[in-house]
Image (cartoon, helix red, strand yellow):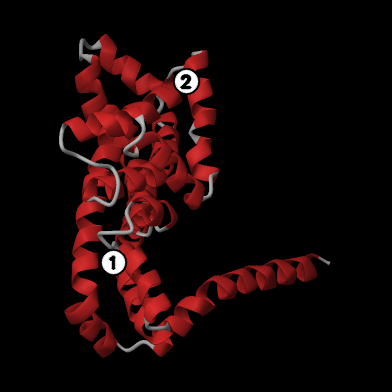
Amino acid sequence: MHRFTTLCVILAALCSACFLLVPVVALLLHVSWGTLWQVWGSDGREPFVLSLETTSIAMAMVIVFGTPLGWLLARDRRVVWRVTEYLMLIPLLMPPLVIGLLLIYAYGPYGPIGAMLYHFHMSAMNTRLAVVIAQVYEAVPYYVFAAQEAFRGVDPAYERTSYSLGVSPGKTFLRITLPLSLPGLLMGLTMAFARAIGAYGAVMVVAYNPHTLPVSIWVALEEQGLPVALPLALLLIVTALPLPLATAFWRRMRHAAIQS
């Protein structure tokens, strides 16, 4: 009976892995790297550069504002932060298309924030700023919840020992808390990066132009068909995938080194 249960578990795991990997394998079999280079030279370069630029800005904002929030969610037990933790689930679970509609309502030209931006000759519609806002909104929960777990995994005893030695809270955070939580923070950042650079629904609503890479894939599919869209999809995958894979590999090697 034990062997039968083990076999069922292995088969279920293999089915799950195959279900996830078959589409990627199919894409790699249907698109040549030479075609990818041609797409890069024609339709892919500008959307790629735009996506990378806006995602880099979005990740900087996610780090600056998401790290303190993740720390407070992990360490501060007051009701306001518990409520905030539940509210952070809203952008995580909300359909991206609905996110785009809400962003238009909040930051569009007829909203108070949009009107304020207009006075500074800025717009959160069909601009790079609009892309960044949509990417941040879609990606920040991934980083915040990862940061929360990373900070929660740091034993407060280390910090109390540092305080008892006269080290300030700021230096304690930089010298103890941050290094110990760094693997979790990096994993959260890479997941947020992949989510932001692949953001489509909200970006499509608030910034159809200029085209990011995901929007370009949709436009190519609609106007030219699957053979043109697939190379752009491969370009997006090879852009978004290396950073999470490298971070996961680094965490595994780091864990192995610590265990040994």
Q: Hey, which quadrant is residue 118 in on the image?
A: top left
Which residue is denoted by mark 1 in the rendering? 239
Residue drawn at the location 25% of the way across and 33% of the way down? 64
Callout 2 secondary element: helix
Q: Amino acid under label 1?
A: Thr
Name the residue at the front extreme.
Answer: 110
- Is the N terminus in the top left, top right, bottom left or bottom right quadrant? bottom right
- Front residue of this view, candidates 174 and 215: 215
Residue drawn at the location 38% of the way across and 79% of the way down? 223
> Quick check: can you spot residue 171?
yes
Image vertical order of residue 238 relative to residue 253, above or below: below
> Quick check: can you spot residue 77?
no
Q: Position of residue 19 (x, y in %)?
A: 59, 73
Image vertical order of residue 119 relative to residue 30, above or below: above
Image vertical order of residue 179 relative to residue 252, above or below: above
Q: Amino acid under label 2?
A: Trp
Image vertical order of residue 186 relative to residue 215, above or below: above
Q: Position of residue 102 (x, y in %)?
A: 45, 40
Q: Position of residue 162 (x, y in %)?
A: 27, 17
